[in-house]
Image (spheres, rainbow, N blue to C red):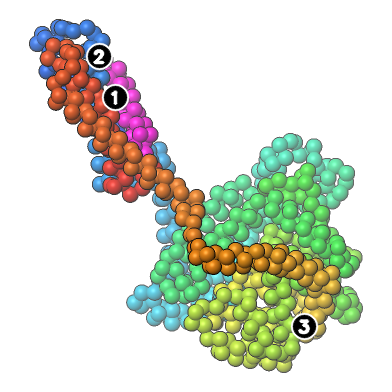
Amino acid sequence: MWIVLGLIALGYAAAIGFATRSLLGTTVGWLRTTLVAALVFIGCWPFAYFTATQARLITENGDLKVPAIVLVLFVALAFGWVFAFGMALLVATEALWPTTAANPVDAFRAALHRRRRTKRYLQILTLLSRHGIGWIVQERPGAAARQQRVGGRAPEALVSAINDAGVTFVKLGQLLSTRRDLLPHSYTVALASLQSGATTLPWPAVRAVIEAELKAPLETVFATVNEEPLAAASVAQVHAGTLLDGTAVVLKVQRPAAAAQVAADIDIIVRLAQRVENQTSWGRDFGAVSLAEGFARSLRNELDYRIEFASTQQIGSVVASSAAAEVLVVPRVYSEASTRRLLTMDLMDGVPLNAAGEQLDQMWPEERAALAAALLDAVLGQLIVTGIFHGDLHPGNLMLLGDGRLGMIDFGNVGVLERSMREGLVTLLLAAAHDDDVATTDALLLVVEAPADADIKGLQRDLGRMLTLARHSAEGEGSIFTAMLDIVREHHLAIPSTLGLALRSLTTLERCLAILDPNFDMVSTAFERVPHFLRRLFTPQSVLGSAQAQVAVLRTTARRLPRRLETISAALEKGTFSVRIRAFSEPDDRWWLGSVVIETIGALIAIAAVSLGVVLVVSDAGPDLVSGVRLYAFLGATIGLVGFVLIIRALRQLFLRHPQ
């Protein structure tokens, strides 16, 4: 008996929850719904008994005095009214105490996730405090004093804290090491020392990932795969192998837990960025949240090797169609052996540039200078002419091959510059090449966003001073690209992400060129080559094509102009000229207007139904349904019930903050 009652009660709870969500458009928690349903279920029976006795449907002894169908109708009406009052109670409690969780399962999962996130969040804050740099995330009394005590050790302390924080934070630090537009030189140098290493994953686990991605046994695609990895990083592990046709390849295999680990840490990084931006002035100046979200998008893309697959093909096509094909090699990628977590490409038979000192020492100085010049030409061609470039071309991503050529690897970060941005970049470089501080300032302001209170005269002075020093500086800090990023940071200019990536690519390219040829003057050579790439960007065909397109646009506009002017002048002459503004042109505006109309009609229908129900109940007219109860009164109570529910639906807009 109790089991049956329990099942009926649960069904009642589900019915009330479903009705409240469907009819009223209100989301309520299941715990609240269950409690209200229990009260409704308990109250239905005495109310139904009271209604039946008042209508004299049953005797005091419980004997039935009317046909069973009549009793069923009255009991259903009584249950309906109690049910409606239960819905009203749910809406009222939801207005006073909004639901924080959709259901117990979601609440339990959210609690577990919140516990793990809070634990990790506190761990990061503890690490910052332990290394004496807790002032980074707050500007409170005493924070400045603590910063002064750390003093010049702050960059090293930050690096130590990041190393302790884990792989995702190491990757964030590596990204920040290239952001001279955001951080001082001392910080970028310290962050550049971060290394993202990891222990090797056992071969059975790696093989399982490969076969899960291929959806087939490993032997159906690869002839051999070396079980010993060539390299192991925090996100992926690299193995050498051969395809069935004997082609030597490398397999980049994502670690099974990498995606979950990165997702958890990204959540923490974004929350830390929000705290930094809310509580510190430097966080607001640098746009900490925007930076963190950009890093999160980049890292998520890095976890999808299909994006890197496409980027590798794009850069390969650009290099193959240029003069750099003689000195640069981009590995082929193989679609039949590449998926979201598996990337297969040609094996680059060489050593990374940062470890190729012995091989470079065996080359003639002229060969090294020619290799550096060809690499610079290739990168400038990508940045200025094609607009697709390697966004992370550091010495570890360049391989010195056995035949003396350079191999480019790791295309997880590829930049794309649209033509207008390329034109702005080449204009900036051309103005800098001619030591024109006014033109350099104007060109820079065309491609960056300056705050309203920007000191343009001060910017011009800093750029002019930088151009003069860079032209007469022998090496290192005289680099025009790093100095320009420093000026962008100091004047709080918002540089587009793609342009910033291009300038950072030129900065990291300097390190590669210095390894190839320590005597190579990148700045002077780049300035000398800018006119060459300018001619390639503005070829006679492209200039003629742009002119023809502009003329075609102007011609079309000009042909329409006389007719429009005639229409306007005729309307002015007749006195019928008017201006019409189209209201509700946006879909959201039309949806809002439609919802207001629907809610208004619903409220009017509800009021009419309740009014009609009251009139029918008190009219005491119509035939008897049973002795003492008129048919019209019964119909009035039923219609009033419908109107009552509709009134609740209309009123919920006034009290609930977020009706669904």
Task: Tell me the tag on residue 527.
Answer: 3
* Disc 1 residue type (three-letter): Ala
The answer to whether residue 264 is left or right of residue 19 is right
Residue drawn at point x = 43 percent, y = 75 percent:
281
* Disc 1/disc 2 C-alpha distance (Å): 19 Å
Q: Which residues are magenta?
A: 1-25
Choose the circle earlier in sequence order: 1 or 2: 1
Q: Residues within 10 Å of mark 2 (few under 14, many from 20)?
A: few
The answer to whether residue 154 is left or right of residue 471 is left
Task: Tell me the tag on residue 9.
Answer: 1
Instruction: Residue 17: say if magenta.
Output: yes
Question: Which one is closest to the eye, mark 1 or mark 2?
Answer: 2
Choose the circle earlier in sequence order: 1 or 3: 1
Task: Tell me the tag on residue 655.
Answer: none
The answer to whether residue 440 is left or right of residue 4 is right
Visible residue check, residue 340: yes
Name above or below for residue 539 compared with residue 598. below
Q: Residues within 10 Å of mark 1 (few under 14, many from 20)?
A: some
For the C terminus, the quadrant is top left
Residue drawn at point x = 30 percent, y = 17 percent:
4
* Disc 3 residue type (three-letter): Phe
* Disc 2/disc 3 C-alpha distance (Å): 94 Å
Give the x, y percent position of residue 464. Answer: 64, 90
